Amino acid sequence: MKLSIIGSGYVGTTVAACFAELGHDVVNVDIDEDIVRSINAGNAPIHEPGLDELVETHAGDRLRATTDYEAVLDTDATFLALPTPSNEDGSIDLGAMKAAAASLGETLAAKDDYHLVVTKSTVVPTTTAEVIGPRIEEASGKTVGDDFDIAMNPEFLREGTAVEDFLGPDKIVLGASTERAFDCLDEIFAPLVERAGNPPVVKTGTSEAEMIKYANNAFLASKISLANDLANICKEFGVDSTEVLDAIGLDSRIGSSFLGAGLGWGGSCFPKDTAAIIAAARSRGYEPRVLQAAVDVNDEQPTRMLDLLADRFDPDGKRVAVLGLSFKPGTDDIRESRAIPLIQNLVEAGADVVGYDPVATENMREHFPDIDYASSAADALVDADAALVATDWDEFAALDSEFDEMRERVVIDGRRIVTRRDGLDYESLV
Ligand code: NAD
């Protein structure tokens, strides 16, 4: 089929390259000329394992990019993969979605045959039916359900394994309200279903599909927060939380994934998605207490870590190394990284902070230009009074004699990754 993907960031580029790999003709539409140039030159505009190879293979053949919405006219269906960030109050900012829907609508005014518009972005329930559809109708003069259909297909890929996740999904969720839309979606997804070995395909309404994405992320974020809550209780009793969590994870009703305790969750999705669904619930008069508690526990983990440091000394004037700056290992993404509140609080307390990360240093430098950055964990530890471990990069497990270069050998481990050794004043957060 011929597909257009509007928005070519993490999701849009991955989806486009993977659909091309699956045999569709795909065009990426993005307002960013650098991204368009990069894709047409055969280079992925973002870092994702396997993505460069796919873009290089298909660019100029089954994959191209453009800033011109007119490209949509030659396609059967359009996926909207625009950013949906948070407003200051946590509610969803639909600015990019609305702008893209209006541009798409203006373009579709000139289209004679049927078209399917699919929301790929994470949006709060009813957005596709009550915001996207009407905007396209208004700009195109066409009627939803008649001249074109709308659908919702949430994306569950994770940064760091985006290609692998897209091509091997646990489930595919298709939300629509007409048979014609489902037929079109079936045709689009048939090659993926076949390649992925027939994963479950959930067919539902557009609002249900929108909510499934939030429920999925809310559940995973809450699972981690519950693991942290339990681990915090364990610590009060001197109980080894890892042994407890590993054991409960053996129960098939619980499962072991997303059950690790530590400094909490960050990244570009969990914080904004939990905030958006909480704000959406409140806008309808419902207070989501469990989800709010999950956010609160997550927000408090960095404070608990700083309290462990304060038990040793006042950080004012002390040199403190923060090891790990990205929100999780394997990425240079620092959005909502737990290292940010740690550094912010240390700087405000008068500490002399030195940060280290194997790949995320430049991104954190933009956020905190005035702290020091080391080129290795070993360098960060030289003359440090304390080290706070914020991300579980494998290399931190191998640190050993490097700790001898510290002034005071206080190590507070937010991820239980450092190997304990004699001579360290070591404490793990959980
Ligand atoms: P992103 O910021 O990486 O990319 C968005 C792209 O949209 C950018 O390239 C931007 O230039 C482009 N854009 C903005 N306005 C535009 C317009 N009017 N017309 C054309 N292009 C425009 O965002 P992302 O991480 O790919 O996320 C997209 C959506 O997918 C979000 O709703 C997000 O919540 C959801 N999602 C993200 C992930 C993830 O891991 N990143 C996973 C699942 C779902």
Image (cartoon, helix red, strand yellow):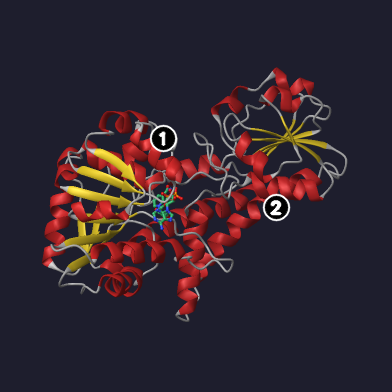
Q: Is residue 123 visible?
A: no
Mark sitting earlier along the chain (1/2) = 1
Q: Residue at x 36, y 37 (%)?
A: 39
Q: Residue at x 65, y 56 (%)?
A: 300
Q: Pinpoint residue 244: horizontal percent, then vertical percent.
A: 51, 44
Of 262 and 387, the residue lying toward us: 387
Which residue type does callout 1 highlight? Glu
Q: CA distance from mark 1 to mark 2?
A: 32 Å
Q: Which residue is mark 1?
A: 48
Quadrant of res 396: top right
Q: Is residue 340 visible?
A: yes
SS at badge 1:
loop
Relative placement, left or right, of 293 versus 420 is: left
Q: Quadrant of the C terminus?
A: top right
Of 254 and 360, the residue lying toward us: 360
- Taking 201 as reference, is 178 above or below it? below
Of 302 and 359, the residue lying toward us: 359
Q: Residue at x 81, y 33 (%)?
A: 385
Q: Count every numbered label the image shows and give the total.
A: 2
Q: Pinpoint residue 3: horizontal percent, then vertical percent.
A: 22, 49
Quadrant of res 423: top right
Q: Residues within 10 Å of mark 1 (few under 14, many from 20)?
A: some
Q: Pinpoint residue 267: horizontal percent, then vertical percent.
A: 52, 48
The disc at residue 303 is 2
The reply to whether callout 1 and callout 2 are in contact (CB within 8 Å) is no
